[in-house]
Amino acid sequence: MKRGYRLLGWALLLSGAPSACSGGDVGPASAGRPSATSGAGEGGAAAAGAGEGGAAAAGAGEGGGAAAGAGEGGAAAGSAAGTGGAGAAPSGECAALAPGPFEPALVTDVFSGSEDFAFDGHGYIVAKQGPNLVRFDATGQTSNFASLPGTVLGLRYRPDGTLVAALPARGAVVQISRTGIVGAYVEGLTDPEGLAPDAQGNVWATDLAGDRVIRLNPDATVDEIASGAPEVSGPNGIVFDPARRAVFYTNSSAGEIRRIDLADPGERPSLVATVASSVLDGLVLDKCGHLYTVDNGNRKLYRVRLDRGGAALGEAELLARFPTGVANAQFGSGPGFDTRTIYVGGAAGSIYAVAVGVAGAPVPAPPDAP
C-alpha cells in the first residue's frame, strides 16, 4: 500500500490544471459572508409515510447515483435552481418543500453495531450485523457480504464499486471489493469517522480526535484540508458539494455545521449553522442544495436550508424524532427504496424512513450490481 501525507495543493484548484477535486460551480455566491444560526423550532408533528417506489439510483433523472460531479444535471443544477441565492428562485419540488416534523417509519432492525450504512444503488442497504457486513433488500431478505469485525463508522461507496469503511480503533480506512474482499486503503489516521467519496474516487473524511478534515486520494495519499480548533473541533459528518466547490462538516459536540470553500483556500472554515444543545453526527445533501444532519445526542433529524453560496437561510428545522439512537442518514437509492425519502440509522441497529418529498444530490454508487 502506498502511503503519504502532504498539504493540499490549493493552487491546482485555482489554476487551469486538472485536479481530483474539481467540480462545477453554481454561479456567483450570495453577497456577503454567511452568518451562523442557532436553535431549532419544534412544531407539531405531521405524519408522512415512507413510499416504497421501485426507484433506480439516488437522484435518478438528475444524473443518477454513479455521478457526483457537476455538469450532469444533478447537484449543480439542483443547487442553482433550487436554493435561490443570486437571482434564482426555487422551482419545482425545491419550491414546495413541506415543513416538518414528520413521523419516521421503521424499515428494519436487523442490523447491530452499525453506526453508518450505504445504498449500493441496486436494491440493497449494506450495514453491520455483528462481525459482518450484510446486504438488506426491501423485501426484508439479508445476505452476508463481507467479514469486518470491530467498530465501523463511516461506510460509503466509491464510483468504481468499492465500499470504504472507517475503522477508528485501527486508525484506518479499508476498502471492500464488490465481491466482499477486504483490503488495505489508508492507515496512520487518528480517529476516522465520516466518509464522503466524490466522482473522481477521492474520499473526503473527518478525523475526529485529530481535529482534521482530510482527503484520501485514490493512491492512498492523504491531503489535509483544514485542521485545528475551534473551526475544526471533533469533526464527524461530512459532505462534498461539487456544485459549490465546498466541503461541509459537523463539529459534533459543538453542534455546528461548517463549510470549507475549496476555491478560497486563504479562508478558515465558515460557520454555517449551530443547533443548540445537540451532538451533530451525519450530514447529507439534497438536490436543492440543502443540508440534513443527525443529532446523535437527542435522536433527531434537522434540515438546514442554504442559499447558493452555502449560507443558512434561517434556523435549522426539526424534521423527525426517533425512538432509538441514530447517527447517519442517506437518501434512498435502488429498487424498493424511495429516492425522495431519507433513511436514518445508528448503532442501535434500526433504520427509519422519513419522507421529505425531495431527492438527494447524486452520490457515487456501483456501476453494476455485485
Image (cartoon, grey):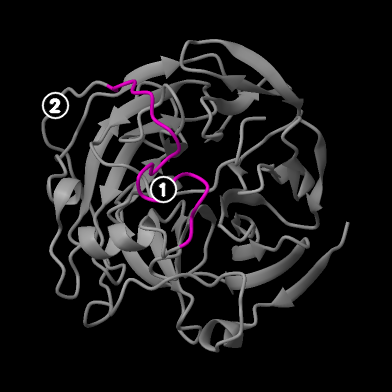
Query: Bounds of the magenta span?
Result: 50-69
Q: Which residue is mark 1?
A: 284
Residue 80 magenta-highlighted: no
Picture residue at 63% right of the left edge, 64% below the top: 215
Disc 1 residue type (three-letter): Val
**Residue 294 location in percent, x, y?**
39, 41
Q: Residues within 10 Å of mark 1 (few under 14, many from 20)?
A: many
Q: Secondary structure at mark 2?
A: loop
First along the sequence among labels 1 and 2:
2
Picture residue at 56% right of the left edge, 42% below the top: 365
Q: Alpha carbon of mark 1 to alpha carbon of mark 2: how far?
A: 22 Å
Disc 2 residue type (three-letter): Ala
Image quadrant in which the C terminus is located: top right
Q: Main secondary structure of the magenta part?
A: loop
Q: Residues within 10 Å of mark 2 (few under 14, many from 20)?
A: some
Can residue 224 be seen here? yes
> Which disc, if any, is residue 46?
2
